Amino acid sequence: MLRAAELSSLEGRPAAIGAFNVNFYSQAEGILEGLRRAEAPGILQASRGANKFQGGPENIAEMVLAAVRKSGHSLPVCLHLDHGDEPAARECIDRGFGSVMLDVSKLEYDANIAAVRNVVQLAHPKGISVEAELGHLAGVEEDVSSATTTYADPYLVPNFFDKSGCDSLAIAYGTSHGPDKGAGLEKLAVHIVEKCYRGMAAFGQNESRFLVSHGSSTVPQELVKEINSFGGKMKDARGIPMDRIQAAIGAGIRKINIDTDLRLGITATFRRYLAEHPGVERGSAELAGIWKALDGSPAAVDPRDYLGHIGRALLRRDPRGTALEEPMRLVRERVAAHVERLCREFGSAGLAPRVEGHSFDTMASVYLR
Ligand code: G3H
Ligand code: 13P
Ligand code: ZN
């Protein structure tokens, strides 16, 4: 498998693997297509919310595996649990995931280590890798909102890896979840990443362990404009500038989490589609539920809030399901284009042939064991 050390020494330019959140089938297809276009290894990750939306981790695993098989995807991909707790991690370990995150950074340091170590003991014998978290990110995460960032303490990182046995560590350094990263941007502290990585290097941990950047979406302004030009009301949307992400990769980040960017692309696609198609216009009674969901919550960019309504309304118009084909094709294309672009920016494009990993069929992780 591709080792952390290789990612940091490719043609003198460090690289990171993209980890893309997945909630539904066409999104999985789009991510895989983007990885193929970039010839990149990649991670598809499902949060507890995603597992719930699809009715359990076994359904997510089946869904991603079906997308892998249908597209003949032969590049290394990993299915990862994003922001898990212990019950979710146990379930995913038993249901075919290749990697799990235990996000218990709200616990005291020693309790965090102990909880992670328990999961490592369950996961490693099955060849499953474990991500943990140190510090607190600002923003919304699994419905819990926090206004402030508590940076990871770099001096604790080698000890955390050593004591917990985890394979990768998400470190809080000023990024935040969701479409508005504005407040945190002044506090973005790439030097925290650098210090964490140096500490790992001093203990030889950088050869086999990873640092992870959560909350890393770039929030393309053209997507925000498109959403707003088709009835959205997004304000204060600001992502992490790509040069900052690349600086963080240069400083030692090896896995980059992206969810919001894909949500924005999917939402822009549906808003445009609904606005441009006669018969599915705003006034239509059968689509009232869709617009209510789209205009409901403040950001209104989570496809899980409106996909059910869209599916039901379009299927009512066309029970054979062909009405959904065109918007879903557009979604796949939108997701694929963004994933491909990000892989090129992250430096993971072209790396797939160098990974001695396996396809998802064998459930091996592309990013460590
Ligand atoms: O950390 C947050 C990720 O974007 C996943 O979000 O828990 O709403 O699926 P979610
Ligand atoms: P974004 O909200 O910036 O896409 O962050 C995603 C993430 O960290 C998923 O764990
Ligand atoms: Zn996250």
Image (cartoon, rainbow, N blue to C red):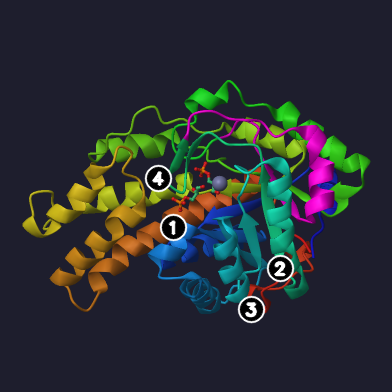
Question: Which residue does the numbered mark 1 point to in the structure image?
Answer: 49
Magenta region includes residue 97: no
In percent of width and height, residue 218 lies at 52, 37
Please state which amino acid type lies under the numbered disc 4: Leu
Question: Which residue does the numbered mark 4 point to in the structure image?
Answer: 264
Is 202 placed left or right of 90 in the picture?
A: right
Image point (79%, 68%), residue name: 356
Please state which amino acid type lies under the numbered disc 3: Asp
Residue range in magenta is 146-175
Marks 3 and 1 close (CB-CB < 8 Å): no
Image point (75%, 66%), residue name: 121
Question: Which residue does the numbered mark 2 point to in the structure image?
Answer: 123
**Quadrant occupied by the C terminus:** bottom right
Q: Which mark lies nearer to you, 3 or 1?
A: 1
Identify whether 125 is placed above or below 303.
below
Report how far apart the C-alphas of labels 4 and 2 lie in the structure. 33 Å
Q: Identify which residue, 232 or 47, lies in the foreground.
A: 47
**Quadrant occupied by the N terminus:** bottom right
In the image, the residue with mark 1 has its CB under 8 Å from the nearest atom of ligand 1? yes
In percent of width and height, residue 173 lies at 65, 32
Which badge, 3 or 1, is on the more N-terminal residue?
Answer: 1
Report how far apart the C-alphas of labels 2 and 1 lie in the structure. 21 Å
In the image, the residue with mark 2 has its CB under 8 Å from the nearest atom of ligand 2? no
Specify few, some or many for label 2: CA neighbours under 10 Å numbering under 14, 14-19, or 20 or more.
many
Please state which amino acid type lies under the numbered disc 2: Ala
Which badge, 2 or 3, is on the more N-terminal residue?
Answer: 2
Q: Which mark lies nearer to you, 2 or 3?
A: 2
Question: Which residue does the numbered mark 3 point to in the structure image?
Answer: 361
Which badge, 4 or 3, is on the more N-terminal residue?
Answer: 4
- Counting labels gives 4
